[in-house]
Image: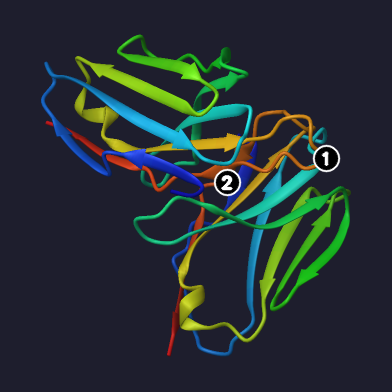
Amino acid sequence: ETGVTQTPRHLVMGMTNKKSLKCEQHLGHNAMYWYKQSAKKPLELMFVYNFKEQTENNSVPSRFSPECPNSSHLFLHLHTLQPEDSALYLCASSQLGREKDTQYFGPGTRLTVL
Amino acid sequence: QKEVEQDPGPLSVPEGAIVSLNCTYSNSAFQYFMWYRQYSRKGPELLMYTYSSGNKEDGRFTAQVDKSSKYISLFIRDSQPSDSATYLCAMSGGLGSRLTFGEGTQLTVNP
């Protein structure tokens, strides 16, 4: 595996379900991000982890719960979601401290909440 | 007012055309400017990265930044059907700072 991988690629869940999204980066980076991408809207930053420590929570509802057990893995735990949470959820990673801290994105998980 | 404005399109051009994609922004603290390309059912991939004002060229792609006008552009020369994608502009105030994205412009290059 290379780059940033995400599983599952597609997820359909009911409003009462609990599910988790997984992200893994194979780039040796020290920062990982969760973004939400909705139609006709810019990418919205949700969470930032720097060296496994959460450094940013962009006013995200508590029904989204991130977890970063190590610098290569990032999870997004979902529970009691709403239909308006349906979107593409993108994970990204970067190497902070370099001259150019480019963010590399995974393919995303397409989430549909019924 | 949005921090970054980008015409969402859609934009449709014939193969071989010169394409111009643009973003305007309001935050004068932005110093790093990026263009990402996102194919359908894929995540965004970095296309161009520029710091401060000026031009940067990479093959058929040229990125321009005019900080005095708070305006950035991406030019695609000799456009190809494989360039059909959504193009996202992004910018930040410094290394390690959060990226602020435009809405994305959907481009279709017709053979």
- Residue A4 lies left or right of residue A51; in this view the side is left
Residue A100 occupies quadrant = top right
Q: Which labelled disc corresponds to residue B102?
A: 2
Residues A5 and B80: in front is A5
Q: Is residue A12 left or right of residue B106?
A: left
Q: Which quarter of the picture shows residue B10?
A: bottom left
Q: Which chain does the numbered disc 1 sit on?
A: A
Q: Residue at x 11, y 16 (%)?
A: A16
Which image quarter holds the C terminus of chain A?
Answer: top left
Spot occupied by residue B12 in the image (x, y as percentages of width and height):
46, 77
Of B39 and A28, the residue lying toward us: A28
Q: Secondary structure at mark 2?
A: loop
Q: Amino acid at mark 1?
A: Glu
Identify whether B80 is placed above or below B84.
below
Please name the residue that numbered disc 1 is placed on. A99
Q: Nearer the viewer, residue B53 or A47?
A: A47
